[in-house]
Amino acid sequence: MWFPGTSQLGVSQFPRYLTIFKSDKEEDYEPKTGCLRWMNKFSRYHNKLLMKELKKLRKLHPGVTIIYADNYGAAMEIFLSPEQYGIEDPLVACCGGGGPYGVSPTTNCGSGEYTVCNNPEKYGSWDGFHPSEAAYRAIAMGLLRGAYTQPSIASIPSSCPQLAELGSSVEPKRLYDF
């Protein structure tokens, strides 16, 4: 069974949140990523509680493989090294109403006077709420290679043999501390 943790609410697929909860205080943002600290702290807290519950489930059902998918960590890679994934604007939506994050409080992608970027693969978000295809690809590769799953999906004997072709990183990456 696969249990996904939540991504960074403070940025990731939610540039609209960066617009809605905009702050004039520099300390409200994470310096390396530009994410809202308090929202990402909430995401990490949620994931910590989820992992505690999954630990209990593993004890109750030892014959079941229960995998925690660290979407937060996998997505954070995009914001720490966007160039590695061909993304130039990880904090900006491709489709929306403009503004510093490509979205506005009054215009949505697909309604009103919205704009669409020329190169969606260069953006981290499609519409301010959903990751772009490039971001989804980066997150999926982090999860499928096993670097952001506990236990590592690549280390499970019954996992898909095609995953071996992707390469694996059995040692999970940790970009943040709970």
Image (cartoon, grey):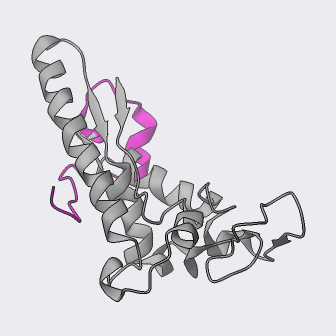
Q: Is residue 89 above or below residue 177?
A: below
If the image is split into quadrants, where does the C terminus sit? bottom left
Quadrant housing residue 111: bottom right
Residue drawn at x 31%, y 47% as measured from the top left? 146
Asked whether 138 or 59 is in front, the reply is 59
- Circle count: 0
Residue in view at x 31 percent, y 23 percent: 158
- Direction from residue 92 to residue 150 in the image, left or right: left
Q: Residue 175 versus residue 28: which sits nearer the camera?
A: 28
Q: Quadrant of residue 48?
A: top left
Where residue 75 appears, as percent x and y from the top left, is 42, 60
Q: Give whichever of 45, 4 is nearer the camera.
A: 45
Q: Is residue 169 magenta?
A: yes
Residue 171 is left or right of residue 77, and the answer is left
List x then y, in percent, for residue 79: 42, 73
Q: Is 97 inside the magenta-drawn segment? A: no
Does residue 30 appear in the picture of this structure?
Answer: no
Tell me residue 59's x, y (percent). 9, 18
> Image check: 51 left or right of 112?
left
Q: Which residue range is magenta in the image?
A: 153-178
